[in-house]
Amino acid sequence: MEEGLRERKKRETRQRISDIATGLFLVRGFDNVTVAEVARAADVSVNTVFNYFRTKEDLFLDRGEESMDVLARVVRERRPGETAVEAVRRDFLAALDSGDWRYGINEGADVFVQRIRESPALQARVEMMSRHREERLAAVLADETEADPDDMTASLVAAQICAVVKALTRHFAVRRIAGEEGAGIVADLRAHAERAFDLLERGIGDYCARPEPRAVSLPPAGERTTPAPR
């Protein structure tokens, strides 16, 4: 359905507020910028800011919903014959090649992480988001494998996948903060990622494989029977 004028203006206003807030937070630090300052810079009222963003933390983590859902979405949309681990490996390596933001391996990610480290409020929010990401992945895994309610396997698998992704992302951020060039880190990180996903696949690799489409087989032409006339 085509986006209406009102919806487009709301989306553009939200994006402008988010962009301005992000710029202020990255330059001055999250705790050193007030919502009132963001509102003035965006030429809107404080109430307007809160109409679009429930909290100040939401202003900084404006892609939080996408971030929390990324692993669950990747598993939901995995290819026929592909396991959960294979799907996450493929998506992670694709993001590594393209510098996509969804795994924190993009330009500016080091500044973003540094600002989180400086703010207890942001650290608490990111920790909560990590828990939600793991819970959402576990829920999808349980649904896809039709697990019993008391089966912990989905939660255990989700915890392992999330731990690998978190460790790889942290490795990139720490080295960028230390001043290393992104290209060199990415080359090393690819090798680390391949090793990490290899280890996962040896332990949980065949878990939650999507079935291949079932082929319809017909008997050879000479063996086909014609229904008798009624």
Image: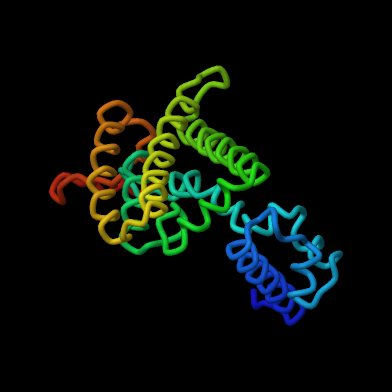
* Residue at the bottom extreme of this rendering: 5
Is 133 left or right of 60, judged from the image as shown? Answer: left
Is 77 left or right of 223, judged from the image as shown? Answer: right
Residues 200 and 25: in front is: 25
Image quarter of the N terminus:
bottom right
Q: Residue 87 appears at what percent x and percent y? A: 36, 46
Name which residue lies at 24% across and 36% down. Answer: 198
Seen in the picture, residue 212 relative to 28 is either above or below; the reply is above
The quarter of the picture where residue 180 lies is bottom left
Is residue 15 in view?
A: yes
Is 221 left or right of 179, judged from the image as shown? Answer: left
Is residue 213 in view?
A: no
Q: Residue 181 appears at what percent x and percent y? A: 31, 60
Residues 84 and 229: in front is: 84
- How many numbered marks, from 0 up? 0
Q: Residue 219 appears at what percent x and percent y? A: 19, 44
Name which residue lies at 37% across and 50% down. Answer: 172
Color scheme of the displayed model: rainbow
